[in-house]
């Protein structure tokens, strides 16, 4: 059976693992409390920008060395940035544990070279432009900006073209020294892990991390001024769009309490992409191409998204139809049969995912970074199975009864 182990180094760096000697692989990841909600206006996009730069070389390795060694280990590796964290992870065979620990830990002390910084600035500007060409993307960003304000949780993960163009390497270095301190980091591992060897190796390799200090002190953002490049209208005009996109956002459960399990089950019953109420009444009938909903959970709050894609001429009728389906759930709840079917579906999904150490890694690292807590698979399954019709009804009434904010994107008028 998997066993949970944890240690806190003198520096404050936390190391956690769910070890299972039966596994054929092991996964490792550094989880850093550095996301877009941690940034100020002059730092907008820095968490994500810094994620790119962590692959651009260290004092011991060039950028080519980093990428070559990742390939040589033959596993999977990547990184991502969200509103609340940045994660660097890899999955390899257990015999490569020391090598991947050495490599990922070394990457956590990047050189942040000026020339590489300028090269990567252009990469990120192109990434922003690419997403701006995809109609739903800008609407999702706008929904977050309006709902949460364009700062904090509503700040764009990529930043804006204006903020990236104004960024400096010195500001990035200061942000790195502020956020990438050991007390802001969790190293998580799962699978066939030598935990004692992991702790010993990391303690030696990270001794200098406590000395990171930022030199720059920024003034607070002015709440009366919008950040550069931000607009807050709830209509987005898209040239040459053949479909209409409607995104609605309201409050939702956070990732902290047990209410989130009822929220996830409700979203599956109502708006899962296959077999849900939205699916049978809007997708299967040909009314819409996409009709779905989901909760977006953060550490201290949440959001509830509803997403509709259809012909512009059908948008208003489909929105009314969708709202009727939501109102019915708020008014009448869900049936015991569909709840049990959804519980079976969700628990089966969790069990199958748990067979991969990489899947367990993210839940382990995320939860320990945010709350200092560990939830085993069995504990999670118990919480899902404990959800009853009353819990579903309570979540529906709390989060779906209020009028959501709609962001609409469609073709500009000729």
Image: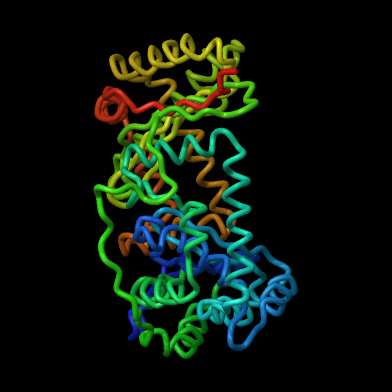
Residue shown at 38%/74% (left/top)? 14
Q: Nearer the viewer, residue 400 or 48?
A: 48
Q: Is residue 69 visible?
A: yes
Q: Quadrant of residue 25?
A: bottom right
Q: Is residue 63 left or right of residue 207?
A: right
Whether residue 226 is situated above or below residue 356 in the rendered picture: above
Q: Nearer the viewer, residue 237 or 99?
A: 237
Residue at the outermost front position: 414
Q: Could you tell me residue 31's position as x and y percent? A: 45, 66
Residue shown at 25%/62% (left/top)? 220
Q: Could you tell me residue 386's position as x and y percent? A: 33, 37
Q: Could you tell me residue 341's position as x and y percent? A: 47, 27
The C terminus is located in which quarter? top right
Q: Could you tell me residue 267's position as x and y percent? A: 42, 30
Whether residue 22 is situated above or below residue 222 in the rendered picture: below
Whether residue 246 is situated above or below residue 384 in the rendered picture: above
Residue shown at 37%/45% (left/top)? 297
């Amino acid at each position: 059976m998997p066993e949970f182990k944890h240690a806190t180094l003198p520096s404050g760096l936390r190391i956690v693992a769910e070890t299972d000697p039966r596994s054929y692989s092991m996964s490792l990841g550094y989880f850093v409390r550095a996301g877009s909600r941690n940034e100020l206006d002059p730092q907008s996009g820095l968490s994500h920008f810094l994620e790119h730069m962590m692959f651009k070389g260290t004092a011991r390795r060039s950028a080519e060395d980093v990428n070559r060694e990742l390939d040589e280990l033959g596993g999977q590796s990547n990184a991502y940035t969200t509103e609340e964290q940045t994660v660097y992870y890899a999955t390899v065979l257990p015999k490569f544990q020391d090598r991947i620990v050495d490599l990922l830990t070394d990457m956590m002390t990047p050189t942040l070279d000026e020339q590489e910084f300028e090269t990567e600035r252009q990469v990120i500007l192109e990434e922003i432009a690419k997403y701006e060409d995809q109609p739903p993307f800008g609407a999702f960003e706008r929904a977050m900006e309006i709902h949460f304000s364009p700062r904090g949780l509503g700040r764009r993960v990529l930043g804006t073209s204006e903020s990236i163009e104004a960024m400096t390497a010195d500001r990035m270095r200061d942000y790195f020294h502020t956020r990438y301190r050991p007390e802001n980091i969790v190293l998580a591992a799962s699978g066939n892990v030598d935990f004692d060897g992991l702790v010993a190796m990391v303690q030696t390799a990270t001794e200098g991390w406590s000395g990171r200090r930022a030199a720059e002190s920024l003034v607070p953002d002015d709440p009366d001024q919008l950040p550069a490049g931000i607009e807050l209208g709830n209509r987005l005009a898209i040239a040459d769009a053949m479909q209409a996109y409607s995104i609605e956002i309201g409050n939702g459960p956070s990732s902290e309490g047990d209410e989130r399990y009822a929220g996830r089950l409700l979203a599956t019953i109502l708006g899962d992409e296959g077999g849900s109420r939205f699916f049978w009444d809007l997708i299967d009938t040909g009314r819409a191409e996409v009709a779905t909903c989901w909760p977006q959970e953060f550490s201290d709050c949440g959001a509830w998204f509803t997403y509709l894609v259809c012909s512009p001429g059908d948008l208003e009728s489909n929105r009314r139809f969708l709202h009727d389906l939501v109102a019915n759930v708020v008014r009448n709840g869900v049936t015991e049969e569909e709840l049990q079917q959804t519980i079976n579906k969700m628990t089966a999904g969790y069990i199958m995912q748990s067979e991969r150490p990489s899947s367990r890694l993210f839940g382990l690292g995320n939860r320990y970074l945010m709350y200092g807590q560990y939830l085993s698979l069995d504990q999670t399954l118990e919480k899902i199975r404990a959800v009853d019709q009353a819990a579903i009804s309570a979540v529906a009434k709390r989060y779906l009864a209020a009028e959501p904010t709609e962001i609409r994107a469609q073709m500009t008028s000729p």
